[in-house]
Image: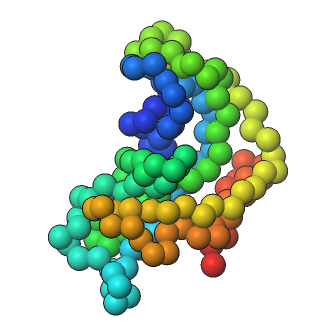
């Protein structure tokens, strides 16, 4: 994938304007239900609200919107080819989509504890104790 702050999944690292990071990505989506303080899914008035996750002390757009009380959150692993990126429409970026994939370490695993905001409201709890594992090309999620 060619990743930037506007891609899904997003890349939130520093990039020159108009550049993308070339990366091999193993990503899955998990449907996350968002309930109100009474345990009911958020109503239609929140449909289309952007979802933000905290990274580096700031809430950042994951480029997903709430629909019918839930959103599809991307999660996974990636390995980048270079840290400065390349122009988004450059021949190198366009060729990357069909290029040889970079090897991802297998197995690997991490646990997420991520504050989440929707429509300016912080979820309580956000994403807590979600473990993502990559092994032999398969992503598994354990979220109590």
Image quadrant of residue 82? top right
On screen, 13 above or below 110?
A: above
Q: Report how many numbered discs are placed on residues in the image.
A: 0
Residue ranking furthest to the bottom: 38
On screen, 55 above or below 21?
A: below
Q: Position of residue 94 (x, y in %)?
A: 47, 17
Q: Position of residue 88 (x, y in %)?
A: 42, 19
In the image, what residue occupies the spot 48% across and 9% down?
Answer: 91
Is residue 17 visible in the rendered image? The answer is: yes
Residue ranking furthest to the front: 57
Q: Is residue 91 left or right of residue 37?
A: right
Q: Which of the image's four quarters has the C terminus?
A: bottom right
On screen, 41 above or below 81?
A: below
Q: Is residue 15 left or right of residue 45?
A: right
Is residue 62 visible in the rendered image? The answer is: no
In the image, what residue occupies the spot 28% across and 71% down?
Answer: 68
Q: Position of residue 112 (x, y in %)?
A: 63, 61
On screen, 100 above or below 24?
A: above
In the image, what residue occupies the spot 46% across and 55% down?
Answer: 53
In the image, what residue occupies the spot 75% across and 38% down?
Answer: 104
Q: Is residue 80 left or right of residue 36?
A: right
Q: Position of residue 5 (x, y in %)?
A: 43, 36
Report the colour scheme.
rainbow
Residue ranking furthest to the left: 45
């Amino acid at each position: 994938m060619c990743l930037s702050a506007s891609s899904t999944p997003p890349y939130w690292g520093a990039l020159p304007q108009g550049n993308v990071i070339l990366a091999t990505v193993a990503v899955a989506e998990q449907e996350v239900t968002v309930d109100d303080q009474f345990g009911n899914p958020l109503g239609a008035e929140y449909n289309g609200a952007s979802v933000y996750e905290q990274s580096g002390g700031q809430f950042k757009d994951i480029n997903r919107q709430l629909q019918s009380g839930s959103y599809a959150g991307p999660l996974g692993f990636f390995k980048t080819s270079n840290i400065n990126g390349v122009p988004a429409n450059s021949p190198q970026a366009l060729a990357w989509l069909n290029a040889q994939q970079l090897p991802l370490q297998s197995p690997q695993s991490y646990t997420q504890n991520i504050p989440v905001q929707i429509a300016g409201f912080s979820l309580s709890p956000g994403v807590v104790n979600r473990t993502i594992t990559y092994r032999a090309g398969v992503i598994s999620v354990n979220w109590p």
